[in-house]
Amino acid sequence: MAAINARRHDLGLTQAEFAQRLGISIRTYQDWEQGRRRPSGRATSMLNQQIL
């Protein structure tokens, strides 16, 4: 999911830092970035917010 990766890079965060801000495991976050899983509705809402 390119949009998720772009959001993380815009914020200048590592995968671990971004996952921590979202309150998820780094493994779940990596699955999102690699397209193996999709974020839930709540997670999608958080990703769309201006501030995490």
Image (cartoon, rainbow, N blue to C red):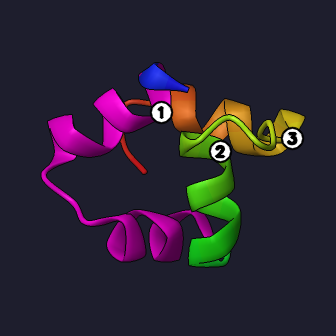
Dot label at residue 40: 3
Question: Is 10 on the left or on the right of 16, as rendered?
Answer: left
What residue is disc 1 on? 4
Whichever of labels 2 and 3 marks the residue nearer the N terminus, that label is: 2
Q: Is residue 4 magenta?
A: yes
Classify 34 as above or below 29.
above
Q: Amino acid at mark 3?
A: Ser
**Is there a contact, CB below 8 Å, between mark 3 and mark 1?**
no
Where is residue 4? Give x, y as percent.
Answer: 47, 33
Classify 11 as above or below 21.
above
Secondary structure that dominates the magenta span: helix
Q: Which residue range is magenta in the image?
A: 3-23
**Is there a contact, CB below 8 Å, between mark 2 and mark 1?**
yes
Where is residue 32? Give x, y as percent.
Answer: 65, 45
Question: Is 15 on the left or on the right of 12, as rendered?
Answer: right
Q: Secondary structure at mark 1?
A: helix
Q: Amino acid at mark 2?
A: Trp
Check disc 2: other Cα within 10 Å, few if <14, some if 14-19, many if 20+: some
Residue at the (31%, 44%) spot, across then down: 8
Residue at the (44%, 22%) spot, across then down: 2
